Amino acid sequence: MERNTPPIVSIIGRSGAGKTTFLARLISELKSRRYRVAVIKHHARAGAEIDRPGKDSWQHFRAGADAVMVATPDRMAVYHRLSRELTPDELVALLPGPVDLVLTEGYKGAGKPAIEVARAALGPELVGDPAQLIALVTDLDLALAVPRFALEDASGIADLLETRFSLGPAAPAVPPPAER
């Protein structure tokens, strides 16, 4: 059986623009609409730590393990040594279950539809390719041929994503695990 490939949308912008804050708002909004959402966080710098120094899993990886899996009763994480950087499409193929939408933080050069978060305080220059932009989340008055949303308007972006990618009826809600 062929697995359906969900749309991939990159949230891009300068450091300090508020990508992570906006992405968290957008995820919450999409989850309230009962969509299954995956997120891929891109670090452009090789060697960035994805585990906390001193933890057992960190020590196992430092000792040379090719893959490390951390499992608890309610979640799991896997990290693996790579010989090259994987594309967003290759990473999506590794997701353990079906999702309706994949959001990336970063991957501005991956050729995926992008939503740029830009703040006037950081200047008017955008980092994304205008041909990839499907929306701007900004407090700037820029004349681009894409919809513009306020910095807090996760609902408006969720509406745009539903329309643009024909997101159908969402799966039954799965509540997020309780905070510990």
Image (tube, rainbow, N blue to C red):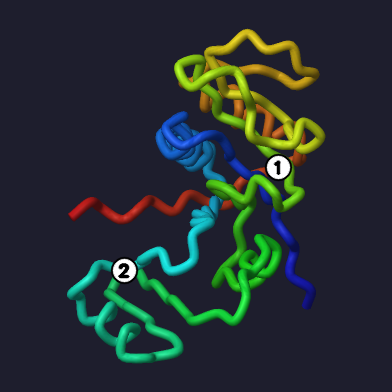
User: How far across and how far down the image is residue 109, in percent?
Assistant: 70, 49
Q: Is residue 22 above or below residue 138?
A: below
Q: Amino acid at mark 1?
A: Leu
Q: Quadrant of the C terminus?
A: bottom left
Q: Check residue 154 in the rendering and tell me which mark sits there, or answer none.
A: none
**Viewed as shown, does residue 118 lie left or right of 129?**
left
Pointer 2: what residue? 51
Choose mark 1 or mark 2, whichever is in front: 2
User: How far across and how far down the image is residue 83, in percent?
Assistant: 59, 81
- Can residue 17 be spotted in the picture? yes
In terms of secondary structure, where does tag 2 sit?
loop
Give the residue at x 37% y 66%: 50
Q: Quadrant of the N terminus?
A: bottom right
Q: Amino acid at mark 2?
A: Asp
Kindly report the distance in space between the C-alpha atoms of the residues bearing marks 1 and 2.
Answer: 34 Å
**Viewed as shown, does residue 179 lie left or right of 97?**
left
- Can residue 32 be spotted in the picture? no
Give the residue at x 68% y 69%: 90
Pointer 1: what residue? 167
Label 1 or label 2, whichever comes before in sequence order: 2
